[in-house]
Amino acid sequence: MQVVRGSRPQQYHHYPAAPLIPTQQPRYHDNSPVEFLMTLRGKIYLLLILGLLYNIISTLNSVFKPVDTTLFHNLIQIPTTAFSNSRLPRKGKDPFTYNVKYNKDENNQKEGEEEEEKPFQPAPYDYYQKPVRTDQHLPDPTFTASKNHTHHDNHTNNNLLVLIMSARNNFEQRQAIRESWAKEYPHNILFVIGGPIPDEDPRERELFSKKLFHEQEQHNDLLDTLLPESYRALPYKLDYALKWIYNKQQQPATTNEETTFFHNLQWYVKVDDNVVVRLYRLQRLVLQKFNPHHPMVIGDIVTDAAKQKLGKWAEDPRYTPDFYPPWPRGASGYVVSRPVVEYIGRTTGLYYYQGEDVSFAIWLEEAHAAFGSGDLTWIHSPEFVFEEGCDEAESHIITGHDMVPAEIKHCFEQFGDTVEAHKSRIYRQEGPVKLHKNVSTFADYNSGGHMYDDEYGYG
């Protein structure tokens, strides 16, 4: 070994060789979620969590559906002028019904417009088929003259019948009427209902059927029109009811109380089951003044109304004129005299247009020649009111629209059915109703002096 001056001898150290180990992948931090998810257990947990989230989202989707805009129908009104010549509510247009653009989203606007601008939709059932009574239908009601007692000033009520258009399952509406404005006239009312609905849930149909049979047994005031209930059934239901009455009147006069009752009828009132009617006021201020043997319609008469081609009231294409004849607003109720009922009763093959009120008017327009010398008279009265609620209803004869049972009872309790110093506004028209040719107007009717009796001095 060589020794260098001034230095220490160089020394060598020998260490054992390190053992060989396999190359490993980089390891993640022990607390990393990614590391956990890479394991089999993590993957199983991830699948379970995703499945749970899917179930939660599906449940929420079924519970929280898109908002139904009809919920706002009674809450939002846009003030406008009166709509005396249209079907629009007098209080104003409803933005959710009449295509007012209410959403900035273009897709939502298109969906709403398509829903409201649909053309005429045919009835869901065939209302021209001959109705067949089954054990699911109610027995016909019976009437007795002796049960119709007197009320107010010993004035008998045997000459008046009220036809109330009612949906088959509107039990509470009918009971509210019986307990309010019809309480003094229990045997002068007839609820006109539709027949069973074929596609209704069988259990619900059975339940409703039992309730209806019990209701008929208890009150004896339901007329089952046999064919399925639907909104488009209203013209059929009116035709059925008037023909049913007419057939009763054609039976030979006997001492039978029911026959006597129908032979005595002179006036017929048509209303819906969501209004209030003051029957004594109607008789005292209106019906006692007019001749029931003259063909006549009294109510909120609409003239020069354009035929609607789109929306809920889109007219049947079979009706070709651009404008309707004068028609009584169905929601306001109207009164017809006996000759009108007799005409409808003996006329077969009437066509059912889109609405009950315009169908009725078209029938009478087509029947003008049938009345001959007894020209049909339309009389407009502002006391037949198409309004929601009963505000300022003290002087009205028929008031309200879309009233719930509690509102019907409250409104009648608030204003009652007395005459007092009230004078009928039926004579305060700005002018006569414009009618088709050769038909008496109210001006002719009033000046002639042969069709009404003004002995009470009203007006």
Image (cartoon, grey):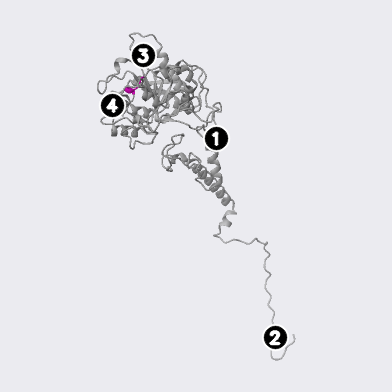
Which of disc 4 and disc 2 is earlier in sequence? 2
The amino acid at mark 4 is: Gly
Residue 219 on image: x %, y %: 34, 21
Query: In percent of the image, x 55 and y 57: which residue is there?
Result: 33
Of badges 3 and 4, nearer the viewer stands: 4
Of badges 1 and 3, nearer the viewer stands: 3
Residue 286 on image: x %, y %: 33, 25
The amino acid at mark 1 is: Lys
Q: Is residue 453 left or right of residue 308?
A: left
Residue 239 versus residue 174: which sits nearer the camera? 239
Which of disc 2 and disc 3 is earlier in sequence? 2
* Residue that label 1 marks: 118
The amino acid at mark 2 is: Pro
Looking at the rendering, in which quadrant would you find the C terminus? Answer: top left
* Residue that label 3 marks: 263
Q: CA distance from mark 1 to mark 3?
A: 45 Å
Residue 363 versus residue 104: which sits nearer the camera? 363
Q: CA distance from mark 3 to mark 4?
A: 30 Å
Q: Secondary structure at mark 1?
A: loop
Which of disc 2 and disc 1 is earlier in sequence? 2
Q: Secondary structure at mark 2?
A: loop
Which residues are drawn in magenta?
287-291
The outermost residue toward the bottom is: 5
- Confirm whether residue 271 shows in the render: no
Q: Secondary structure at mark 4?
A: loop
The amino acid at mark 3 is: His
Q: Secondary structure at mark 3?
A: helix
* Residue that label 4 marks: 457
* Residue that label 2 marks: 9
Q: CA distance from mark 3 to mark 2?
A: 148 Å
Sort mark 3 into few (<14), some (14-19) or many (20+) by Cα contacts within 10 Å: many
